[in-house]
Image: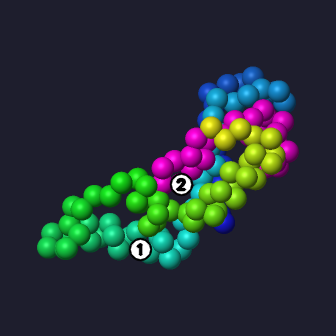
Amino acid sequence: MAACIRWRRRVTTAGPFPTLCRPAASLLLLNRPIEREAALQKFLADDHRRGSPTYHQWITPEEYGRRFGPAESDVQAAQGWLRAHGFEVTRTAKGGHFIEFSGIAGQLRGAFSYRDPSI
C-alpha cells in the first residue's frame, strides 16, 4: 500500500507546531494499484469518446472507489494503523482515496517521522 500525507495549516512565521497543538485536519492519501490506474485511464478515455458504449455514463463515488480506488483491505489497514497510533479517524472518502484524521502535532511527528518545514 502506498500512501502520502498532507497537513493543512495557515502559513505563519511563528515556528513549528507546538507538540500539543492540534492541526485543523490531516489527510492520509492512498494511491490506487497500478492496474487500477490503467483501468481508470481507459475508462476516462472511453467515457469522453463519442461513439463509445460508455460515453457519458457517469458513476457514483462508491463505484469509482470499487473500480479504481485502493483496495478495501488497504483502506481498513490504514484506518487501523492510524487508530493504533492514537489518531481519531474522522472521515473516509466514499471512493476510499483519502482518510481524514486528527491528532496532536507530537503524534504526527512520532508516527510519521515528520519534521515541520519551518524548523
Q: Nearer the viewer, residue 12 or 111?
A: 111
Q: Residue at x 66, y 41 (%)?
A: 89
**Residue that numbered label 2 is attached to:** 96
Q: Quick one: quadrant of the C terminus?
A: top right
Q: Tell me if residue 104 is in the magenta stretch.
A: yes
**Residue that numbered label 1 is attached to:** 39
Residue 79 in the image: above or below residue 64:
above
Q: Nearer the viewer, residue 9 or 11?
A: 9
Three-letter amino acid code at the position of disc 1: Ala
* Whether residue 45 can be seen here: yes
Residue 94 % position (x, y): 48, 50
Q: From which residue to which does the magenta span run? A: 91-119
- For label 1, the crowd category at 10 Å Cα-Cα, with few meaning under 14, some 14 to 19 and many 20 or more, is few
User: On the picture, is 103 further left or further right than 65?
Assistant: right
Q: Residue at x 62, y 37 (%)?
A: 90
Closest to the camera, between mark 1 and mark 2, is 2
User: On the picture, is 53 further left or further right than 80?
Assistant: left
Q: Quick one: quadrant of the N terminus?
A: bottom right
Q: Residue at x 75, y 40 (%)?
A: 87
